[in-house]
Image (spheres, grey):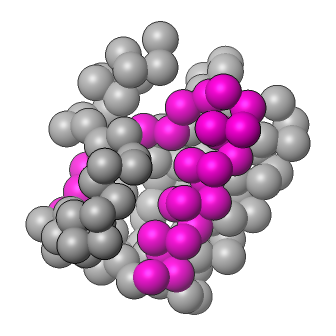
Amino acid sequence: MNFKIEDKGNITIVRCVSEKLDSLIAPELKTLFLHHSNNGCINFIIDLSQAKYCDSSGLSALLVGNRIVKEKEGSLNIFGLNPMVEKIISISQLDTVFNITDNEETALKNIL
């Protein structure tokens, strides 16, 4: 597993434990979003503090999660961005799409 999952009531925290969010693990993240949303979760917090690299497949997986929660009127918050990951999100102009916070506490407050 490339992700650790923590269920906190109506919030699922997904922690990336891989250094890369790329085409090899992006399908796993998409599957996690689908599985947990089908089981009633509409709020996700994504911890990317371990990820040092992200490619277009990783961004696509995050966009899938974002679309799923928007359809269900939930929230997706991302925190722990490494400078390289933050740069690719910014270059892709997805920093205006995603809810990006500085830490887990702020991400939790955004949902609650």
**Quadrant, the N terminus:** bottom right
Q: Is residue 42 left or right of residue 101?
A: right
Foreground residue among 1 and 63: 63
Which residue ends up furthest to the top in the rendered image?
A: 112
Residue lying at 31% horizontally and 49% vertically, measured from the top left: 96
* Quarter of the figure with residue 84: bottom left
Asked if residue 67 lies in the magenta stretch, the reply is yes
Q: Is residue 33 above or below residue 108?
A: below
For the image, the number of numbered tags is 0
Residue 49 visible in the shown view: no
Residue lying at 48% horizontally and 74% vertically, measured from the top left: 58
Q: Find residue 85 and report its horizontal and vertical position in percent.
A: 25, 69
Q: Find residue 43 and report its horizontal and vertical position in percent.
A: 60, 31
Residue lying at 58% horizontally and 75% vertically, measured from the top left: 26
Q: Is residue 50 above or below residue 88?
A: above
Q: Find residue 40 and report its horizontal and vertical position in percent.
A: 82, 30
Which residue ends up furthest to the bottom in the rendered image?
A: 24
Q: Is residue 42 above or below residue 28?
A: above
Asked if residue 83 lies in the magenta stretch, the reply is no
Residue lying at 57% horizontally and 88% vertically, measured from the top left: 24
Q: Is residue 29 above or below residue 15?
A: below
Which residue ends up furthest to the right in the rendered image?
A: 38
Q: Is residue 15 left or right of residue 24?
A: left
| Region in magenta | 56-82
* Quarter of the figure with residue 60: bottom right
Residue 63 visible in the shown view: yes
